[in-house]
Amino acid sequence: MITFGTYDAARHPRTAVLVAGLRAHGIKVTELNRPLGLSTAERVRMLQQPWRLPVLAARLLRCWAALVGDAVRHRRAEGRPEAVLVGYLGHFDVLLARLLYPRSTVVLDHLVFAGDTAADRGAAGLRVRLLTGLDRLAVACADIVVTDTDEHRRMLPDPDKGVVVLVGAPDEWRTAGESSAPSGEHHLSGVFFGLYTPLQGAPVLAEAVRDAVAAGASLRVTMVGAGQDLPRTREILAGTPGVAWHDWVEPGELPALVAAHDVCLGIFSDTPKGLRVVPNKVYQGLAAGCVVVTSDTPPQRRALGEHVELVPPADAAALAAGLVRLGDPAALAAARERAARGRDRIRPQVVVEPLVAELRRRDVS
């Protein structure tokens, strides 16, 4: 089996989780990977703003030229692969994979729907329709489509083509949690990291932190990232003590930073997309040894409901009350025990089991 595409496993570890999980099941995986060097936000921005498309096209063609060379060399050495896994953000890459490997089983990791993501970030009209068309073309090129939740699987034109594989977390997050020592400080520490997109509900979190501190909670919060909701979030938290801001943290440094906190803060909106996803940070925070607080939505409850602290979506008062409650050492200790019992469920070799089962059903590897 090969992985194929312009994915960037350092920025977006989803493909790394799949590869690690497949290898743990004894499947030989060779990576043909030429990272495009663009984040999800940058790719979506380029697709929303047509004048940026030449930059995307130029980068994509350079990467594709290198991938074609890699594919030719691999075929000469190893022959035709039985299965090709097209990595995260592979909407275009899957077209090339289908052309290069017409007789192989093509698996598309369709973690992000382009049209849905653009709509969540404020796009509308023709642009969303075009990106939705791109989604349809991409999944049509694949034999198996991997999604992260059943809600996303049901959005596929042919849901029977879909296999749900939870996002999971790379083992380095677990290692960071095992290496982290208690701070010994007498306050609750929380960390939020993300792109401040509407689905994350950062303003809801800001209201909750402000109100919890105003109610007397001893709370320190680290806010990491930048995006469209950051100005509003900063405005709400202006004057609230104990809040630290970081525009960016290198991917290699993020696990240790998160593991140094008591609580990892998930998503809190009630947007349509926010109700369909379980974000990376929920799995990563859990793996890093944190108590995870996130919204009570069907996919999050289904995936990890017994091991994370759930609050109603878009309910700042409920979130504030939850943070105040976790400030009690006994409540925090009980939440830590619930979290610890869920960590083995999100390891790569566990989350990838549905995909392994589907590949074996098709007698491919």
Image: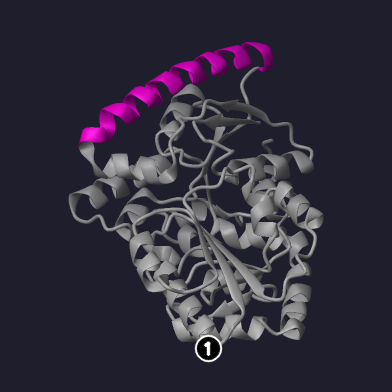
Magenta-colored stretch includes residue 211: no
The correct choice, above or below, for 362 with respect to 158 in the image is: above
Residue 308, position as x, y percentages in the image:
65, 73
Residue drawn at the location 45% of the way across and 70% of the way down: 275
**Which secondary structure, mark 1?**
loop
The correct choice, above or below, for 151 with respect to 360 in the image is: below
Q: Quadrant of residue 363?
A: top right
Residue 153, position as x, y percentages in the image:
49, 58
Is residue 208 toward the left or the right of residue 189 in the image?
Answer: left
Q: Let me know if residue 169 appears in the view.
A: no
Is residue 185 toward the left or the right of residue 139 in the image?
Answer: right
The correct choice, above or below, for 227 with respect to 68 in the image is: below
Work out whether residue 228 or residue 329 is closer to the camera in this orientation and state it: 329
Residue drawn at the location 32% of the way across and 53% of the way down: 118
Quarter of the image for the N terminus: give it. Answer: top right
Which residue matches tag 1? 215
Residue 264, position as x, y percentages in the image:
61, 66
Q: Let me know if residue 209 appears in the view.
A: yes
Secondary structure mostly seen in the magenta stretch: helix
Work out whether residue 205 or residue 104 is closer to the camera in this orientation and state it: 205
Numbered disc total: 1
Residue 100, position as x, y percentages in the image:
48, 22
Magenta-colored stretch includes residue 74: yes
Which residues, given as a range, are shown in magenta?
51-78
Amino acid type at circle 1 is Ala
Quarter of the image for the C terminus: give it. Answer: top right
Residue drawn at the location 41% of the way across and 39% of the way down: 91
Work out whether residue 63 or residue 260 is closer to the camera in this orientation and state it: 260
